[in-house]
Amino acid sequence: MTIGPSLDLVRMIVRRALSEDIGHGDVTTQAVVPTATRCAGVILARMPGVAAGIEVARIAFDEADASVTFNAGTQDGGGLAAGDVIARLAGPAASILTAERTALNFLQRMSGIATLTRRYVDAVAGLEVRILDTRKTAPGLRVLDKWAVTLGGGSNHRFGLYDGILIKDNHLRIAGGVAAAVRAARSAAPHSLKIQVEVETLGQVQQALDAGADALLLDNMGLADLRYAVEAVGGRALIEASGGVTLATVREIAETGVNYISVGALTHSPPALDIALEISQ
Amino acid sequence: MTIGPSLDLVRMIVRRALSEDIGHGDVTTQAVVPTATRCAGVILARMPGVAAGIEVARIAFDEADASVTFNAGTQDGGGLAAGDVIARLAGPAASILTAERTALNFLQRMSGIATLTRRYVDAVAGLEVRILDTRKTAPGLRVLDKWAVTLGGGSNHRFGLYDGILIKDNHLRIAGGVAAAVRAARSAAPHSLKIQVEVETLGQVQQALDAGADALLLDNMGLADLRYAVEAVGGRALIEASGGVTLATVREIAETGVNYISVGALTHSPPALDIALEISQ
Amino acid sequence: MTIGPSLDLVRMIVRRALSEDIGHGDVTTQAVVPTATRCAGVILARMPGVAAGIEVARIAFDEADASVTFNAGTQDGGGLAAGDVIARLAGPAASILTAERTALNFLQRMSGIATLTRRYVDAVAGLEVRILDTRKTAPGLRVLDKWAVTLGGGSNHRFGLYDGILIKDNHLRIAGGVAAAVRAARSAAPHSLKIQVEVETLGQVQQALDAGADALLLDNMGLADLRYAVEAVGGRALIEASGGVTLATVREIAETGVNYISVGALTHSPPALDIALEISQ
Amino acid sequence: MTIGPSLDLVRMIVRRALSEDIGHGDVTTQAVVPTATRCAGVILARMPGVAAGIEVARIAFDEADASVTFNAGTQDGGGLAAGDVIARLAGPAASILTAERTALNFLQRMSGIATLTRRYVDAVAGLEVRILDTRKTAPGLRVLDKWAVTLGGGSNHRFGLYDGILIKDNHLRIAGGVAAAVRAARSAAPHSLKIQVEVETLGQVQQALDAGADALLLDNMGLADLRYAVEAVGGRALIEASGGVTLATVREIAETGVNYISVGALTHSPPALDIALEISQ
Amino acid sequence: MTIGPSLDLVRMIVRRALSEDIGHGDVTTQAVVPTATRCAGVILARMPGVAAGIEVARIAFDEADASVTFNAGTQDGGGLAAGDVIARLAGPAASILTAERTALNFLQRMSGIATLTRRYVDAVAGLEVRILDTRKTAPGLRVLDKWAVTLGGGSNHRFGLYDGILIKDNHLRIAGGVAAAVRAARSAAPHSLKIQVEVETLGQVQQALDAGADALLLDNMGLADLRYAVEAVGGRALIEASGGVTLATVREIAETGVNYISVGALTHSPPALDIALEISQ
Amino acid sequence: MTIGPSLDLVRMIVRRALSEDIGHGDVTTQAVVPTATRCAGVILARMPGVAAGIEVARIAFDEADASVTFNAGTQDGGGLAAGDVIARLAGPAASILTAERTALNFLQRMSGIATLTRRYVDAVAGLEVRILDTRKTAPGLRVLDKWAVTLGGGSNHRFGLYDGILIKDNHLRIAGGVAAAVRAARSAAPHSLKIQVEVETLGQVQQALDAGADALLLDNMGLADLRYAVEAVGGRALIEASGGVTLATVREIAETGVNYISVGALTHSPPALDIALEISQ
């Protein structure tokens, strides 16, 4: 089933976003929209893509005014054609107008991420590999960025520094090598966490396996080296490839047999999906 | 001089981002990096662009550990070539490694925005027009997104619904027309705020001027119409053009004589600038 | 229509006030009022004035206990005679008693501000001038203080340092004169904000107009000088008079033809309106 | 020695006030004051009174910019003549200008309260009575309002519903009479709290004493009745008088021999003391 | 009637506890429990004791998901046999499983405290003495720890440093003796608070009485001395005994005639009551 | 090296604890301790045990007043004899007295946990097993409770629902058996997390292994069954035993060859270590 973040957390993020946009008040709406006026509206996709953030948009309108009704026209993760209705709204006009931009900003970013992810996932269709996100997310929006990745068909890597052990090159320069670092992690960290280590050479691969690493990160490695590493590991550890992965290269990387390919661009450079709200009185 | 946001606000955003990433603790670093180890590091640009977020990154390391020294190699708004040093760091290795990703996430997004903005600004070089941002920002990061725009040479539109009056098409559908809406705004809103209204026809332009609008928003209007509107207004109100502006079209739009061109893509779809931290012990 | 602040913001202020008063618990009520006891009560004006804060009081009881019913006897901005019913309450006695003081404190302050404002507004009846508030508000209560001013018939000046440009004497001492300051503001600030500058001499008035100021602040200027300035400006900028305005002097100041008169006392020294809650079992 | 509130609490109140005023940034100062400019300034009393809030103003500038120096010209509780220097400031001009209004708002309110309190205290000079505040404070500012009362020579009543038991008329209507209410309070509340009850008749005075009340509140009682009650109590409980106390009546009330006189106006209607900041470059 | 803390405060504590446990999401439940699945469950006591925290557990499930129904099988303060049903739950399985541990942690701690308190209260049955708690509570949980004490039949001492005056040995070393300290407290503190002082000798008892102390704290005093002090005080002040009180010694201490016996162990070392949730589909 | 939680998190917990205790102010200390008075003090163990919380106590005094000096007499995790100096303090007497109880409450709880943990660790000395904590911690104090466990020589289980997958009996009743649940978890959860499942029978052990579980939880299983399970698993998964473990039984459980033994009592029922602060002027 779908993994989504704690809704309390989402609600807090939405509240902050509304507060950031509304401040002491929406002076335009307060001035030109009579309090009693009601309206209807539709949220429309203006380009094709994958819907994400519908539940977040629902919360945005609900936080602005619990009397606004929000009926989703599709569901998170569903495909969108240009012109598709994402949701229908009805309620006090002032509330809908005040929450509009915040709701759309969430929808546009999350749908943008889901859409980009879907393209990577489609590019490796039929292969036994998963497309992963990274921690290169918009600060403060990690749970939403990662939720959008799963809605696009990708899988989540760890959410932060607290729920996964990933010993990277910068750690290795300080920790005294792969073997020492892996052993230190096994000794100190909760047994609920797997231990992953970034390796650059076949020697390091062997050291990591010997020290008991559960997973390897092969960063910026060529295809031949990736194939070689997959064979050397022989299933004794999970293998993740990363570094400069593009839609043009992702399939050939996947074909080396790695288990995971992580793509920073999914969350650090997703083009927004164009989505608009049209009000009808 | 440069407009930057309240540093208190920035500090709060940085704290939240660190907390989002660190949670109950950086289990990898705690396990493999001895507390007493110190290190040095450089933050490097890996592609050319415009630096932005250096002061935010400084705060990120400072919040993680006030004993980390952070010496900027350039300044916010400065140009970057691939390989340029953005900052040099020294201090406790654990602190630097723990704050690394958060600091880079801010730098990569803000520099991405500044770099994209600079391209738009350069595209209209020599013309009397300003490139503006919009409210299509990453939720929770508006002050940083808008700061980055100014570092790239752009100008800020209003920061939220509270510090500018912009009567848009959705408002007009409810408020009973341009004239009524502008008059309502003049009557109700603080006199410190200008009144801007979105118009689609020359008739509306005239109504807006008659009602005392201070600025007009011409959304998705063709070049000929823009020219016509500029002439009709004759300096009696500020004119902003918006809607589907690209690097290919921005100069011809500017040449119509509008005062402002707003570009949503600056903040809703900025490609991250590739920036890395390299640790040396 | 009436401008009121974001209700989310009001709710947060009310919550803090309840928390400030209740702390770990209302020991008196917990000790002497059985949990199951219900009661009714009326909130009464004990002196004539203008009602303000009714919606805030409603929130206070709602936050304390959503099962308390609150029926307003008049509406915010309405006139009150001594003995008038402001609201009728019914619900759990403990909840009503615990929230009583907090609700009354809001009502008394806001109604005091609205009442004082109404006196200034009445004093300039028939003239084309607006009575403005200032930023001299009780710290933490600005949106409520300013809401009360509008309920009394006054208009709001900017809400903070972020939603209006007002170059004051202290800025001018540093910025190198009126012309330089106004030009700097025009160059750096969002175009959504008008630029207002404090001027003391006719020469400065001319400099301000030449540099493109949208509004002038004439502080502590005599009536003759005000008249002279109004004529000199000739409608090219808005004019606000301020400084030591009293009920005795406000009309003659208004008759000089200024557009706005700001009165700090509305929010820094408003006498509370006497309002009480009477419980009947 | 002087009782002041927890400084952490004060700091949080000051931060909220700065945030309320500054929002996303002080656009005027950012536009017209170069970052590097430094200045000096003096905070001056413009009318005579009692200084209060100096330590709060110090915190306001410190929170805005820890590099601002703040040298008090007098101390909290000290007398002020018009023109007296309350503090001298030096530091970055932008920081001082940005924090100015917030600091002055605290100073003006607190000094206003202290000044009014001093007048009441002086009016009862030589008598064995204390002037008390009430819970009729500006919401969110109770600790500061009450601090100002002590700086004016008054004494604090309970800070909230949590640190004192005061059974008022509204409680009595529900609790079944004075005796039952006092006994319930004695049974349920922490022994660290005295039990005070509002009484209106001599019969109630006797009931309260019999039930073990520690203090009585005589609200809106005439002078003769007050004298009679004082005699009847004979020192077995503390006596507080309240209700419509003015500077004209406070001394005759005090002369009845009551121990405390509480004055709501000290904090619900204090006229601000006029205080200004003058910048010199 | 029973004294409980402000429910707003309880709700905030519960929210923090849920957030501490859930973080970005309950990955197990999200992975293995379909969103639509509903379930029922019972919360059972696994050992005999006193129920406490039922209302807190109710809030925990309500905060997790307002659609979960929670029917208490007994009430706070009621006795429990092993196997007794504390509450029956029904609702979305994911919500119940996610909130389970947080709810149980509150129940186990609070019931543990209530159970231990009941044992002390039972040990002094028939005597005119009250068992008190102290400020030795789990940081952040004071209102719950103290609520549990009352549910076990004990009484609350002050809740913090703000709602009671207790001059302890460490204060006396600095304040210059019992008489000076008591007089200072009488002069400076709100009259709503009683003044209690720790004394070690009969001379100090006399000084405290002479200075007007309302209550005495006799810490670690032998039985003979306690009896002597009780007689010397003769009802002129309340007497609390403390220090190393155990179930074996509490009755003989009570028989000396002291009014209160405070027991730190109630809240610093309460064994948790074993309580479990059993799900049935 | 030692794993400790994010110090930012600790600081926030300490601030809340101070605020809980101090509220609007420490009325006793404010009344009886002159502001200028300085003092020294020692924190002493009154019973033998293991020190924990020293760094937390340091933060408590630092948050109360950064000018207080705190010199630890031992270090976290060190052994204590009765009378040992844990820390020496010097600074403003008022600050030290105000923070005293909060600092001691942390020290007493954490040292109590560390001391109890050490007893379990010592009981299995020489065996290849680790003593684990659980999520049965005091709400809001999990990071400190778990830190204390590591200081006593134990190891941490997952910190919350977010950083480990543990499929328990209640999940299994809903998820349709061990195999289905483990497969669902493998499919949906981040690969950084190991998958642990509670099993009761050898059949379930086999299902769990077949489905790819990384670890098993054997709850309340007899010694013979534990031995049998250890042999059946043959190192293919980690094994944790739990349920009713006591100091009397922990060694025989360890001797069955399980990898981990989790003990809820470490954090749900730790007796506080007796620790005191003695002030000398």
Image: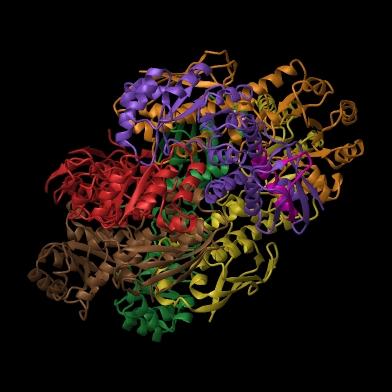
Chain colours: A yellow, B green, C brown, D red, E purple, F orange
Does A94 appear above or below D181? below
Does B265 appear above or below F236? below
Residue D169 seen anywhere in this rendered image of the structure: yes
Residue C12 seen anywhere in this rendered image of the structure: no
- The percent position of residue B246, horizontal first and vertical second, equals 49, 66
- What's drawn in magenta, residue-wise? E80-109
Q: Is residue E101 magenta?
A: yes
Q: Is residue F126 left or right of residue E272?
A: right
Q: Is residue A4 magenta?
A: no
**Nearest the eye: D210 or B168:** D210
Q: Is residue D142 left or right of residue A268?
A: left
**Nearest the eye: A131 or E173:** E173
**Nearest the eye: E243 or C171:** E243
Q: Is residue A62 left or right of residue E170?
A: right
Does B124 appear above or below F2? below
Does B30 appear above or below E81? above
Q: Residue furthest bottom?
A: B203
Place residue D195 in its image quadrant: top left
- The residue at 46%/49% (across/down) is D179
How many numbered dots are placed on residues in this image?
A: 0
Query: Which image quarter holds the N terminus of chain C?
Result: bottom left
**Nearest the eye: C183 or E269:** E269
Q: Is residue B19 left or right of residue B201?
A: right
- The percent position of residue A218, horizontal first and vertical second, equals 69, 38
- The percent position of residue F199, horizontal first and vertical second, equals 84, 38
- The percent position of residue F75, horizontal first and vertical second, equals 54, 19
